[in-house]
Image (spheres, grey):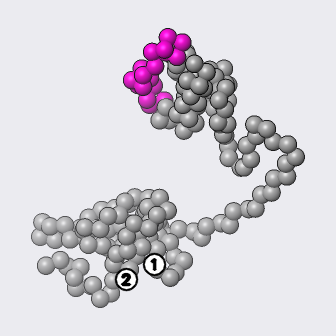
Amino acid sequence: MNPLNHFISQMIEFQIYRNSVLIDTVKGLKNTEKGSNKKFIGFFPDVDIQIGDFLMVPNTSIKYSIIDVDTSTYMGEIYQLKAYYQTAPAEAKQPSVTFNVNSSPNSIFGTQASAIINNPSFNISDFDSLIESNGGTDKKELYQLSSQLQELLEKDEFHKSKLSKFSDLIAKHSWLPLAIAQVISAYLQSH
């Protein structure tokens, strides 16, 4: 028998949010670990909770940010999933921003740090400008990627495996996949 069954009447419902999406509502028991005094919520072991999830008690504004997950065992069996948490601070209200624009060709409005315009004439030169402004310490490798991309397009030998050696670099820079796609798209539209 699971030791948590003794406390089932004291358990309360928690909503589990992952990536801001409600994925489940489950019962759990708030507790504090003896010795370390770390706060956790105990759940039955079949509950899917991951580090980074947020828990909320329905009809309250209390938000628990999950910072660690562990298990407890009894007689060699896992009986509890322990979700260690921090109480999340109330979200600050986003300031309102107003943009007044008279003329806006090829413009982007907002408060983002960087952006790419969907431009059918986007070319390697534009790609290199992005590398210069966003490449940081990886500029040398990014320029190698640019050269290889240009060579592949000129020889009409493009295949995604040809850029596989740059996969870590592409994963590291969030702006890079879209920029590569725009260069390829512009090339295909012009040929």
Res 13 → quadrant: bottom left
Please, what is the dominant secondary structure of the magenta stretch?
helix
Query: Percent from the top left, x then y, of residue 114?
Result: 67, 40
Please state, as top left, top right, bottom left or bottom right, where the N terminus lies in the image: bottom left
Highlighted magenta segment, given as a residue range: 152-169
Amino acid at dot 2: Ile
Q: Where 123 sits versus 12, above or below?
A: above
Query: Percent from the top left, x then y, of residue 80?
Result: 25, 70
Please state, as top left, top right, bottom left or bottom right, where the C terminus lies in the image: top right
Residue, x 76% and y 62% (percent of image)? 96
Residue, x 85% and y 48% (percent of image)? 101
Res 74 → quadrant: bottom left
The answer to whether any part of residue 32 appears in the image is no
Q: Which mark is residue 94?
A: none
Left or right, 28 with respect to 135, comes to: left
**Residue marked by disc 1:** 57
35 falls in the magenta region: no
Q: Which mark is residue 12?
A: 2
Left or right, 55 with respect to 9, comes to: right
The answer to whether any part of residue 126 appears in the image is yes
User: Along the line of sight, which residue is nearer the eye, 85 or 45?
Assistant: 45
Left or right, 133 with respect to 10, comes to: right
Amino acid at dot 1: Val
User: What secondary structure is marked by label 2?
Assistant: strand
Residue, x 37% and y 82% (percent of image)? 12
User: Along the line of sight, which residue is nearer the eye, 44 or 108?
Assistant: 108
User: Along the line of sight, which residue is nearer the eye, 10 or 181?
Assistant: 181
Query: Percent from the top left, x then y, of residue 150?
Result: 55, 16
Q: CA distance from mark 2 to mark 1?
A: 8 Å
Res 11 → quadrant: bottom left
